[in-house]
Image: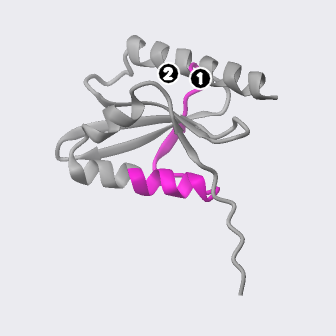
Amino acid sequence: MYKISNVKPLAFCGSALTDLKRFPEKTRNEAGRQLRRVQHGLDPHNWKPMNPVGPGVREIRIRDEHGAFRVLYAASIRNAIHVLHCFKKKTEKTAFTDLSLARQRYRAALIQEESEL
């Protein structure tokens, strides 16, 4: 029996992987489970669109006893799922610095994709 896998690889932008590794273990594991769902073409359990960052950018939302954590990613870029930014939310509204960093990394991923064509 042959199994053909359409799993899209993850590409961590900037310090996103290092930032994700700083999440508490339980939260980090949940983020990994949700990213695996995205790799298999499924939606994360709790997400919302992040259009101010870029078209197709989504935010995985994780809440636990340590607080609210976010993983911003773009699955619409052809070659991989680009994990743009991972952070702990400190206020109700997502901070401008977090949005602008994710936007900058999104643009860089698009430029890199164009240069590979």
Position of residue 65 in the picture relative to residue 46 (left or right):
left
Between the residue at mark 1 and the residue at mark 2, the CA separation in whole angstroms equals 6 Å
Q: In which quarter of the image is the N terminus?
A: bottom right
Of the pair 23 and 80, the residue shown nearer to us: 80
Label 2 neighbour load within 10 Å: few <14, some 14-19, many 20+: many
Snapshot quadrant of residue 18: top left
Position of residue 83 in the picture relative to residue 63 (left or right):
right
Query: With respect to residue 8, does 95 lie above or below?
Result: above
| Element on which disc 2 rests | helix
Q: Which residue lies furthest to the left in this view?
A: 65
Label 1 neighbour load within 10 Å: few <14, some 14-19, many 20+: many
User: Do the numbered discs 1 and 2 sit on residues whose CB atoms are within 8 Å?
Assistant: yes
Query: With respect to residue 39, does 50 lie above or below?
Result: above
Q: Mark 2 points at which residue?
A: 102
Snapshot quadrant of residue 68: top left
Q: Does the magenta stretch include residue 75?
A: no
- For image coordinates 43% across by 37% down, the residue present is 71
Q: Name the residue under label 1.
A: 106
Q: What residue type is labelled 1?
A: Tyr
